[in-house]
């Protein structure tokens, strides 16, 4: 399986599982689903952008790879900080639900992103 397809498949499966837990595992009305959805969209977009930047830079020379991956990380984190500030200042979500779900999703999805990187590296190593 291609690494990008494999990554997207894992991202979708994880998202379905997490939303299943949120929908059926929590008491109805205990969490503002709109706030959780906003956090989820931000994190999934961030994770997907990070992996796509990694895919783009993977076979490039070391200097380009470092600039794209780490520069992309800095830009993605700055964009996330601005978006979080916007959500909080504009009162677009219930802050406690948003922040808690934002950090939970970030911790979970960054692991998936790192595992995607490792799998891509492993496939290249096996091909060589």
Image: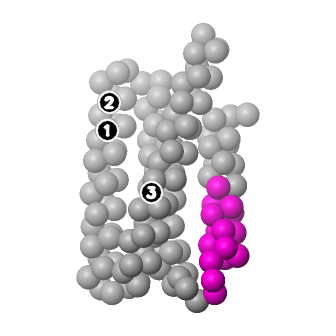
Residue 24 is left or right of residue 66, and the answer is: right
- Sequence-wise, which precedes: disc 2 or disc 3? 2
Q: Which residue is mark 3?
A: 106
The mark closer to the camera, 2 or 3, is 3
Residue 70: image tag? 1
**SS of the residue at dot 1?**
helix
Q: Report, in whole angstroms, how far the alpha carbon at label 3 lies from the one at label 1.
A: 17 Å
Crowdedness near tag 2: few (<14), some (14–19) or many (≥20) residues, C-alpha within 10 Å: some
Location of residue 65 in the rendering, given as x and y in whole percent from the top left corner: 37, 29
Residue 22 is left or right of residue 65, and the answer is: right
Callout 3–callout 1 Cβ contact below 8 Å: no
Which stretch appears magenta?
14-28
Q: Is residue 96 above or below residue 73?
A: below
Callout 2–callout 1 Cβ contact below 8 Å: yes
Callout 2–callout 3 Cβ contact below 8 Å: no
Q: Residue at x 47, y 69 (%)?
A: 101
Q: Quadrant of residue 91?
A: bottom left
Crowdedness near tag 3: few (<14), some (14–19) or many (≥20) residues, C-alpha within 10 Å: some
Quadrant where the C terminus sits is top right
Q: Is residue 107 above or below residue 122?
A: below
Q: Report, in whole angstroms, how far the alpha carbon at label 2 lies from the one at label 1.
A: 6 Å
From the image, give the main secondary structure of the stretch colored magenta: helix
The mark closer to the camera, 3 or 1, is 3
Q: Report, in whole angstroms, how far the alpha carbon at label 2 lies from the one at label 3.
A: 22 Å
Is residue 99 located in the magenta-colored stretch of the structure? no
Crowdedness near tag 1: few (<14), some (14–19) or many (≥20) residues, C-alpha within 10 Å: some
Q: Which residue is mark 2?
A: 66
Location of residue 32 in the rendering, given as x and y in whole percent from the top left corner: 51, 84
Location of residue 107 in the rendering, given as x and y in whole percent from the top left corner: 46, 53
- Quick one: 6 or 104, which is closer to the camera? 104
**SS of the residue at dot 2?**
helix
């Amino acid at each position: 399986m291609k690494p990008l397809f494999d990554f997207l498949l894992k991202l979708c499966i994880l998202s379905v599982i997490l939303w299943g837990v949120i929908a059926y595992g929590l008491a109805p009305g205990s969490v503002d689903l709109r706030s959780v959805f906003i956090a989820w969209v931000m994190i999934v977009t961030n994770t997907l952008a990070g992996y796509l930047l990694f895919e783009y830079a993977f076979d490039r020379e070391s200097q380009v790879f470092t600039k794209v991956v780490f520069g992309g990380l800095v830009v993605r984190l700055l964009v996330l900080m601005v978006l979080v500030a916007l959500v909080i200042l504009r009162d677009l979500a219930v802050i406690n639900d948003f922040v808690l779900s934002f950090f939970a999703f970030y911790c979970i999805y960054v692991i998936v992103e790192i595992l995607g990187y490792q799998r891509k590296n492993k496939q290249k190593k096996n091909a060589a």
